[in-house]
Amino acid sequence: DVPRVLGIAGSLRRDSLNGQLLDYAAAQLPAHVKYRRYDELKSVAPFDEDDEVAPPGAVERLREQLCWADGLIIATPEYNSAIPGQLKNALDWASRPIETAALREVAAVVIGASTSSFGAVWAQAQLRAVLGAAGARVLDSEFALGEAHERFTPDGRLGDSELARQLAENLTLFMTEVTATAAIRTTEGC
Ligand code: FNR
């Protein structure tokens, strides 16, 4: 099976550094991977457990995109030492109903960019915990891009070769998980 990867940027803003990081990471994936970037995060309504069995259309589409994927790359910003509310909200929808949750068994890797020197490490740790709680197979690694506003070349690449190497290493580990998942993941009832 051809491995399928979905990318999500946790920021809604147009010039998001996490969006740039996600696009760069996606461009490093092996050529045979089918990749899609999810772009409807802003349309996902606040989670309401009353609606989880018959959710709004944007939530259905989020679940469909996740069910399509064997692997998930999330680039998260850090807001006040945590993941942005809109990202947590979408993941809460995708974690329910538990038996058929779209996040279950998907291979996931977390990366993050911030304008401080830390590279969203607290948000990344929190995001790994959230994904793990929802049943995703989360890679125990992070890629922290600090001072991200100074890191991209005009054509969207990472200027620092050591950082580029670190990211490539994480993506190689991720692709091993994605390939294993593609061979076994059933999206039945998803
Ligand atoms: C931030 N920022 C930030 N950075 C950080 O390293 N730790 C933090 O806790 C926070 N907190 C925070 C809260 C809020 C509400 C905003 C808007 C920003 C700065 C953040 O790293 C910066 O705005 C990034 O550019 C956000 O990511 P995107 O939108 O560029 O992807």
Image (cartoon, rainbow, N blue to C red):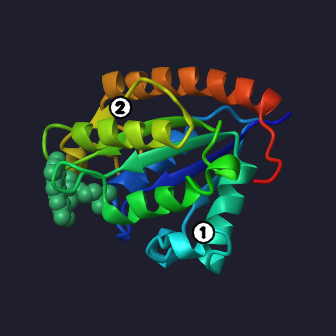
128 and 116: which one is in front? 128
Is 90 displayed left or right of 70 in the figure?
Answer: left
Question: Disc 2 versus disc 1: distance between alpha carbons?
Answer: 33 Å
Residue 112, by quadrant, is top left
- Label 1 residue near ligand 1, CB within 8 Å: no
Mark number displayed over residue 143: 2
Residue 129, by quadrant, is top left
| Residue at x 47% of width, y 24% of height | 170
Identify which amino acid the numbered label 2 is placed on.
Phe
| Residue at x 65% of width, y 53% of height | 66
Identify which amino acid the numbered label 1 is placed on.
Glu
Give the labeled residue for mark 1: 52
| Residue at x 36% of width, y 49% of height | 76
Neighbour class for label 1 at 10 Å: few (<14), some, many (≥20)? some
If you read the primary sequence from the N terminus, does the residue marked by circle 2 or circle 1 appear first?
1
104 and 17: which one is in front? 104
Vertical position of residue 140 compared to residue 114: above or below: above
Vertical position of residue 160 compared to residue 43: above or below: above
Pinpoint residue 98: horizontal percent, then vertical percent.
62, 50
| Residue at x 46% of width, y 70% of height | 47
Pinpoint residue 176: horizontal percent, then vertical percent.
65, 21
- Label 2 residue near ligand 1, CB within 8 Å: no
Secondary structure under the numbered disc 1 in the rendered image:
loop
66 and 56: which one is in front? 56
Pinpoint residue 177: horizontal percent, then vertical percent.
63, 24
Q: Is residue 35 visible?
A: no
Q: In which quarter of the image is the C terminus?
A: bottom right
Ligand 1 is found in which quarter of the picture?
A: bottom left
Secondary structure under the numbered disc 2 in the rendered image:
strand
Is 156 displayed left or right of 68 in the figure?
Answer: left
Q: Is residue 53 visible?
A: yes
Disc 2 or disc 1, which is closer to the eye?
1
